[in-house]
Image: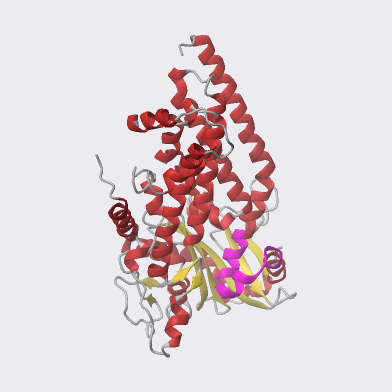
Amino acid sequence: MQQSNAYIITFSIILTVVLGLLLSGTSQVLGPLQKKAEDLDNKKQILGAVMDPKELSVLKPEEVLAYYENRISSMVVDIQGNEVEKGADGNPIVAEKVNVSKNYKLAPEKRQYPIFIYHAEGNPEDIENYILPVYGAGLWDEIWGYVALQTNLNTIEGVTFSHKGETPGLGARITASNVQERYQGKEIFDEEGNLQSVVMQKGEGKDYSGDKHKVDGLSGATITANGVNNMLKNYIGHYKPFLEKQKSGSASEVAVLN
Amino acid sequence: MSTETAQVTTVKKPAEELLSKRRKKLITDPLIDSNPITIQVLGICSALAVTTQMQPTLVMAISVIFVIVMSNLTISLLRNTIPGRVRIIVQLAVVATLVTLVNEVLKAFAYDMYKELSVFVGLIITNCIVMGRLEAFALGNKPYDSVLDGFGSALGYSWIILAVAFFRELLGSGSVFGVAIYEPISNLFGEDFSLATNGLMVSPVGAFIILGLIIWVQRTKTGYVEH
């Protein structure tokens, strides 16, 4: 079949318009559902830092949201550890809406740092854990997670890590609960109050239960493990002013947003 | 590709039963005799990448079935209007649209699967099976036949990746569809006994090995030799 150029061009234009309409229509219809799914996933990750993954996985979506509503309050601080309530545009900032990966592209001084507070049911004053988001680079792509600290702001209650493109079976194991459990009970500051973070060691299979700042490594995924180490050290470092303020007794001043 | 086209033209007969012998062959042929993965060795990249566990593999299989069937149908409906000189681009546009649809639907209704699969769902576009069937079959055949042909090819792809995933998940993670298999077996033999999982199976190398074994067994049975 030999068609004229005009026919080919008309055909292409019609095809493009039809397919384009189809796609933008779908995106319009499914958009709100996708936002909800994203939001739920985000909240699940936050809760994952303080909850047993098995417990969390049996909850239905509505139960997760209700639990989150009851147990988590949130706030946003700046690099000095002062609470920020309004963004540059004057609108109130919601910690859940802060995009950590977008903030990562800004200079550390300009970023917004969300903090999620896990508290006893119905009583935001009765704080059980502080949950801090962390973000960094793995071997292939971004990695991120949440670190839950106990009220002494030093001992790690639990962590969750996620990744975009780490190697399955190697770096991707940072999402496995048996890897994340290694962080429980570790401490981020030494006795002088200097930030030591928790460092994943090279090699795997050694026992670091005696060392408060070391955890067993990931065999074959040293670069991802280094990424995790840098991420923790960087981000916890950014939160240090806030943590110190909390420790020095100004805890009562912290207004809790939700 | 040229051999396939020749093959297709020879089976073309005026039989018009809903599921005539010829049409059944369209579906059953790609399952074993001209399986896209084991015989034509197409679509290998996704077969390696997504098959560490059964569940994402199943979602991937369903997505591929949808994309192949729908793109075959669309291209076959348009086959007399598509200008020959831009046909590849037209095919690509249709396939890309369908793939994006699948991705959007997954994102809205199965977010966990979307997170796990999103890159690979996008890569269905480059799955040679899709374009292969469009070029070799849908452009020259009626819509209903094209749908059957696409469905057959997609099923052939699906059962192979599901088989690979079954062995990889069982041997690599000790479970099937996320249900632990190794654990209860280990418990039968007392506290200290535990079946070891094989880390090799979790990495893509494991897929090569399993796939190689499947191809070996199949070719031994059918006596197929590459020419």
The spot of residue A29 in percent (x, y) is 69, 41
What secondary structure characterizes most of the magenta part? helix
| Vertical placement of residue B108 versus B20, above or below | below
Residue B91: horizontal and vertical position, in percent? 48, 29
Image quadrant where one finds the C terminus of chain B: top left
Residue B50 percent location from the top left of the image: 43, 54
What segment is highlighted magenta in the picture? A41-64
Colour pattern of the rendering: secondary structure
**Residue A58 drawn in magenta:** yes
Pick the residue in front: B3 or A94: B3
* Residue pictured at 60% horizontal, 59% vertical: A41
Vertical side of B103 occupied by A55: above or below? below
Residue B39 lies, in percent from the top left, at 33, 45
Query: Hey, which residue is sitting farthest right in the picture?
Result: A122
Q: Is residue A190 above or below residue B38?
A: below
Look at the image and tell me whether residue A193 can be seen.
no
Q: How many marks overall?
A: 0
